[in-house]
Image (cartoon, helix red, strand yellow):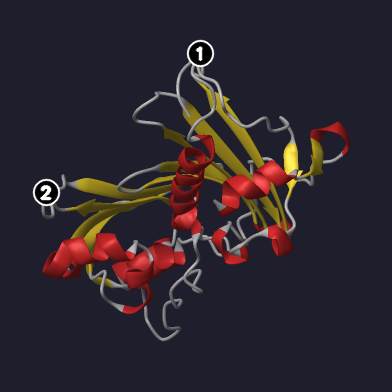
Amino acid sequence: MTRNTGSAGTTPRLARTAAALLAATALVAGCGQETGPAAAPSSPAPTPKEALLASVPDGTEGTFRFTGRDSTSNLSGLVDPTAKGIQLDTSVKDPELGFTTTMSFLVLDEEIWMKVAFSDTKGLTGLPKLPKRWLKLDPAKLDDPAGVPQYDGADVGNAGPLIQAATDVHEEGTGRYTGTVDLTAGEAAQVLEAEEMASLGDAAKQIPFTAVVGADGNLTSLSLAMPKSGSGKPWTFEVNYTAYGSAPAIAEPSGSAAQDAPPMAYKLLNG
């Protein structure tokens, strides 16, 4: 795709953009574990690690909002455990042409919709024409159905597996925790992309973290300070959970707000 010169390269470039957007949703790829074990009944008081694990959302808190970021992307959305629903929104800016692709996914149990929008497109031609509606996807038409987001528990940021892999946890004040995480331990190793894990090397065994728990006992934020590796810069893995019980419920889009996805949507996702 080029400026003012037709549509050459449109499909390959947007396929790469779609791949990047789908990779961004890896933040919500569940590791099969929503929280760590509860404190042992015989303990007079939970340890800091047990208290922090108990704050991770397990689906009983009602709907809530979340944001997250990793080395390359930002993600935001809603979680509705009762409906087994999530809404995800993420954007990628094309480094050469400057336009931004925003991709949203809405998941309700086994059903999934997608919405795509382009911005900063002045002077561009060749962008695909997609309806400005929620586009219902047919998994049978996807080359990799598991590559699109799915509901896999309330802890969409995988805070539970990360805290479970903490080698030491300290409470620094009411609701504030610090410590280190061994990213090579247990299911924590699945949270990052393989390339990110490889670049960390031995440093992955001692990643500093901070966490905040709200007055209601629910996790508010978890932040991991990733060190510089190779030629890369230090970066932060972060997940924030807010508006417990007050965020809007997720409903199935209907009427003029939705339609079946056209062939171009699958072409974009499948590359």
> What residue lies at 65% left-to-right and 53% top-to-bottom?
62
> What residue lies at 68% left-to-right and 53% top-to-bottom?
107
In this view, the residue in front, 142 or 9, is 9
**Quarter of the rendering containing residue 128:** top right
Q: Residue furthest bottom?
A: 42
Q: Residue furthest right?
A: 255
In this view, the residue in front, 38 or 128, is 128
> What residue lies at 64% left-to-right and 41% top-to-bottom?
246
Name the residue carrying label 2: 231
Numbered badge on residue 22: none
Q: CA distance from mark 1 to mark 2?
A: 35 Å
In this view, the residue in front, 96 or 69, is 96
Q: Secondary structure at mark 2?
A: loop
Q: Is residue 154 above or below residue 100?
A: below
Would you call the spot at circle 2 few (<14 residues within 10 Å), some (14-19), or many (20 or more)?
few
Q: Is residue 92 left or right of residue 63?
A: left
Would you call the spot at circle 1 few (<14 residues within 10 Å), some (14-19), or many (20 or more)?
few
Residue 94: give x, y in percent of width and height: 40, 31
Q: Secondary structure at mark 1?
A: loop
Residue 143: give x, y in percent of width and height: 61, 62
Q: Is residue 237 left or right of residue 145?
A: left
Amino acid type of the residue tagged 2 in the rendering: Ser
In this view, the residue in front, 83 or 192, is 192
Residue 17 visible, this angle:
yes
Name the residue carrying label 1: 122
Q: Is residue 62 above or below residue 34?
A: above
Amino acid type of the residue tagged 1 in the rendering: Lys
